[in-house]
Image (tube, helix red, strand yellow):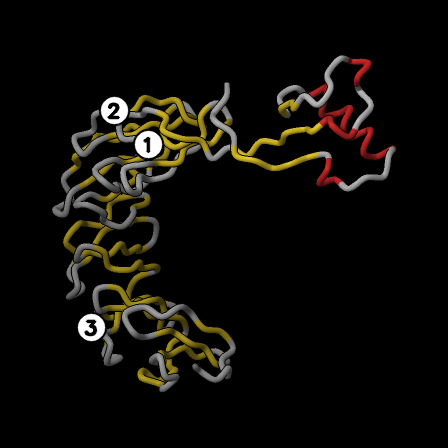
Amino acid sequence: MVTPRFDSAKDFSEGLAAVRIGSQVGYIDSKGECMIPLRFQAAGNFSEGLATVNENNLWGYINKLGEIVVTPRFDSARDFSEGLAVVRIGSKVGYIDSTGELVIPLQFQDAGDFSEGLAKIKSNNKWSYINHIGEIIIAPQFSKVDDFKENLAPVRKWNIWGYVNRSGKIVIPFQYNEVNKFTGRLARVNFNFHWVYINQTGEIIASDKLDYRINLTFFPLNWLNMGNKILYKSEVIFGIMAFILYKCVIIPWSYVVEKVKVPFRD
């Protein structure tokens, strides 16, 4: 346990955590011992043995001994991923290696971390993907994209989402309102305003949609010939009636509505 004594603290990464006292930032180990003195204006998490630090309003990188290995000279800098890190000078973004050498020139509007050998980049207001030497692998054409995971990446056109493979082929058509990356060969997506899980062919596997079932057992609705029928929230009129009855007759809300998992319904 580390005794509370810092003005702010970040999560541990690779055995060290950035902590702040006043305006100075340094790093502690899991015992709370100061391993890198508090001397930076700002600092990030360690990734691949290096961490971003800010000195004189410029960003560079240190190793776990606190030694400067990439001289602070960037307006912004991101964590290393697959041996490369995104850096910005002015309005242009490129990539450096762990020695600080610029291996992909500062030429993009924006860029992301490498994942599965590819990184998203923005150029001329369109997103695409490059490889480790800066070659464009998937042509700029998307309004928004996310990282590759399990060989597929979410991409957006016309304000709807689909998925591409590593060659740029649309393998799951543009049809979703919102999407997530694949994990365990499943992705959670919003389809027709319902959250469902799809496999890597786009087939709906399951729904995590929470619906509300209105239990009419407790209401004198026999005159509607419904008895104890259970209705879904999509049948709006009955939901409104149940709510009005709840407001007019003091009974626990738990008797009115039960929150349950239901299969996907159109």
Q: Which residue is mark 2?
A: 170
- How many neighbours does mark 3 have within 10 angstroms: few (below 14), some (14-19), or many (20 or more)? some
Residue 3 appears in view: yes
| Residue in the picture at 27% in, 50% down | 113
Secondary structure category for the residue under label 3: strand
Which mark sits nearer the N-terminus, 1 or 3? 3
| Quadrant in which the N terminus appears | bottom left
Q: Which residue is located at x 26 percent, y 26 percent?
A: 201
The residue sitting at 40% across, 68% down in the picture is: 11
> Badge 3 is on which residue?
69
Count of residue discs? 3
- Residue 206 percent coordinates (x, y): 40, 30
Which residue is more in the foreground, 90 or 123?
A: 123
Alpha carbon separation for disc pair 1 and 3: 36 Å
148 relative position to 28: left or right? left
Work out whether residue 49 or residue 225 is closer to the camera in this orientation and state it: 225
Whether tag 1 and tag 2 are in contact, CB under 8 A, the answer is yes
- Tell me the element at label 1: strand
On residue 155, which mark appears? 1
Q: Quadrant of residue 86?
A: bottom left
